[in-house]
Image (spheres, rainbow, N blue to C red):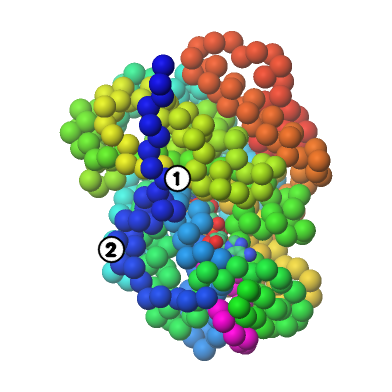
């Protein structure tokens, strides 16, 4: 049997194509000389740009330079699913890691970022399709039934569940969206979806208006902490007393984070518009949807009636570094297409517009972490592990405070100074990570199909958790 042709690879992502068609933005050519600044920021994704934005709000005279190897938003910030969350889904991890009071404080502060993002868009005249209609987590196989209970129980015990986490029966789920594989689920209110690239490009516009200097196409090849910190690109150098490392999964290429951050590919396929099919299945409320596989599927709609359907995949990144397979991997994309049609059979005849991928910065903690290096002048915010759209806004507040040496509720968050358990060194890491991630997906697939998981696969899938990493079932 011949396989159906694969969809085209988007230029970065469908989101970035759409955002740049709306507004290509002021050009920011590569750095070609030696310059000085008060702060140099490596990475023009949400973390770097929110930090620049809040620094300028706090101190309008501060001189900031942002360097990005690509365009701002060329990494995951312009490629992601656009789910805007706080950290409530991570509540059991937060409590285990930090204790109850610090966990609650952290989750509440993280939650502020969601309405703040909507308000920021309004204030700056940004149409980033901000839709605060909640997210629906749904079981798609018997093995996923009740997978949300631990989080719900912890939230209830701490008095935080009420109107935030609402359990839904299978009938209630089907009122929001009908699929032959959907069962019961949970609605997380006070969450949102947005167009991720419209957000990051708007942020780029606003920080440029604030006077931040941005150099795109400027990979930092050598970085010295100093002080002063020095960031060397092919064509130039920035010297600054203070620096921020906000390079996402690419931070794994620096020795300091080599065993802390594991890049992992996540991929999305985008259908052509089919609003009539969305009406047929009743998915017209704009909720983001995800299932409870270990390598979970995440799916959402667009205003013109498309489905963006994504999932993490074991296939890329690990061992292969941050190569082209992270941006488009045929095997992972075929798996996604099969799963999209299994979830929504009526979309089998809807053409696919494109597909793309990007690297997630996985850590053993499953939580973002912040800190300071060297002589106290180099800061970092990393490890958003596939959930940074909301938390990177909070990160901007944390990191701008750390850079200015401010004492406030953000700079006293317990995520600062956390050190994730290191992954094993090479040559164990790459093959070990690939095999366990492949086992996780195979276990997910067996459970989706109601098959028993092969015991060897089951053992391999559970191994990372047995070794103390928050990865896998
Ligand atoms: C396919 C996919 C789907 C996702 N879906 C969601 C979702 O729905 N919801 C959610 O909350 N999160 C999601 N995420 C995760 C989310 O996108 C990230 O957590 C978030 O974008 C991290 O932002 P950041 O600024 O820290 O890093 P990035 O967006 O990775 O930005 C880092 C920047 O640094 C630049 N850079 C790296 N190295 C260098 C260097 N040496 N010199 C100069 N520049 C450099 C890169 O080009 C990049 O622009 C998803 C991620 C992917 C890949």
**Which residue is at 78% across, 47% downward?**
422
The residue carrying mark 1 has its beta carbon less than 8 Å from ligand 1: yes
Q: Nearer the viewer, residue 239 or 233?
A: 233
Closer-to-camera residue (178/188): 178
Which mark identifies residue 22? 2
Q: Secondary structure at mark 1?
A: strand
Does 457 sit left or right of 288 as displayed? Answer: right
The N terminus sits in image quarter: top left
Quarter of the image for residue 425 reads top right
x, y (%) of residue 447? 53, 17
Of residue 326 and residue 127, the one placed in the foreground of this image is 326
Label 1–label 2 contact, CB within 8 A: no
Q: Nearer the viewer, residue 407 or 455?
A: 455
Establish if 118 lies above or below 375: above
Question: Residue at horizontal 59%, vertical 72%?
Answer: 41
Q: Residue furthest front?
A: 2
Q: Which label's residue is closer to the chain start, 1 or 2?
A: 2
Q: Residue at x 76, y 43 (%)?
A: 423
Q: Which element is circle 2 on?
A: helix
Q: Is residue 111 above or below residue 116?
A: above
Image position, residue 182 (x, y; %): 38, 22
Q: Which mark is residue 441?
A: none
Magenta residues (range): 31-44
- Asked if residue 157 shows in the view, the reply is no
Which residue reaches farthest left?
Answer: 276
Where does the C terminus fall, quadrant-wise? top right
Give the left or right position of residue 321, taking residue 227 as reference.
left
Residue 452 appears at what percent x and percent y?
A: 59, 10
Q: Examine the image and state in which quarter residue 222 appears.
A: bottom right
Q: Tell me if mark 2 has few (under 14), some (14-19) or many (20+) residues whose alpha carbon lies within 10 angstroms of its own.
A: few
Rendering coords of residue 82 (x, y %): 41, 49
Q: Which residue is mark 1?
A: 356
């Amino acid at each position: 049997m011949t396989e159906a042709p694969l969809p085209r690879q988007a230029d970065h992502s469908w989101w970035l194509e759409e955002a740049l068609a709306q507004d290509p933005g002021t050009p920011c050519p590569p750095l070609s000389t030696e310059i000085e600044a008060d702060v140099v920021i490596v990475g023009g994704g949400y973390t770097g740009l929110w930090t620049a934005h809040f620094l300028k709000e706090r101190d309008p005279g501060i001189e900031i330079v942002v360097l990005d190897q690509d365009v701002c938003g060329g990494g995951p910030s312009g490629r992601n699913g656009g789910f805007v969350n706080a950290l409530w889904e991570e509540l059991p991890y937060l409590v285990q890691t930090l204790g109850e009071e610090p966990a609650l404080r952290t989750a509440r502060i993280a939650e502020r970022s969601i309405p703040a993002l909507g308000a920021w868009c309004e204030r700056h005249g940004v149409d980033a399709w901000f839709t605060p209609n909640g997210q629906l987590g749904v079981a798609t196989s018997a093995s996923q039934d009740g997978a949300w209970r631990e989080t719900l129980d912890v939230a209830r015990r701490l008095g935080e569940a009420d109107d935030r986490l609402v359990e839904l029966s299978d009938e209630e789920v089907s009122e929001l969206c009908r699929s032959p594989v959907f069962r019961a689920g949970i609605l997380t209110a006070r969450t949102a979806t947005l167009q991720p690239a419209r957000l990051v490009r708007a942020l780029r516009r606003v920080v440029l208006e604030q006077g931040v200097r941005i150099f795109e196409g400027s990979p930092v090849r050598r970085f010295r902490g100093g002080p002063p910190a020095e960031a060397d690109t092919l064509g130039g150098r920035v010297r600054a007393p203070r620096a921020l490392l906000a390079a996402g999964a690419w931070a794994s290429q620096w020795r300091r984070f080599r065993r802390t951050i594991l890049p992992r590919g996540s991929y999305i396929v985008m259908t052509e518009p089919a609003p009539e099919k969305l009406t047929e299945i009743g998915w017209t409320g704009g909720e983001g949807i995800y299932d409870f596989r270990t390598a979970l599927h995440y799916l959402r709609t667009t205003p013109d009636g498309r489905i963006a359907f994504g999932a993490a995949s074991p296939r890329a990144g690990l061992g292969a570094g941050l190569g082209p397979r992270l941006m488009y991997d045929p095997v992972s994309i075929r798996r996604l297409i099969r799963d999209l049609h299994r979830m929504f059979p009526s979309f089998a005849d809807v053409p696919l517009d494109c597909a793309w991928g990007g690297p997630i910065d996985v850590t053993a903690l499953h939580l973002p972490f912040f800190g300071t290096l060297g002589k106290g002048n180099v800061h970092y915010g990393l490890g958003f592990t596939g959930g940074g759209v909301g938390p990177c806004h909070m990160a901007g507040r944390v990191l701008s405070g750390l850079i200015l040496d401010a004492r406030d509720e953000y700079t006293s968050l317990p995520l600062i100074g956390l050190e994730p358990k290191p992954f094993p060194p090479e040559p164990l890491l790459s093959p070990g990570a690939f095999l366990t991630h492949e086992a996780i997906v195979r276990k997910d697939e067996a459970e989706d199909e109601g098959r028993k998981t092969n015991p060897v696969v089951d053992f391999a899938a559970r191994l990372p958790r047995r070794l103390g990493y928050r990865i896998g079932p």
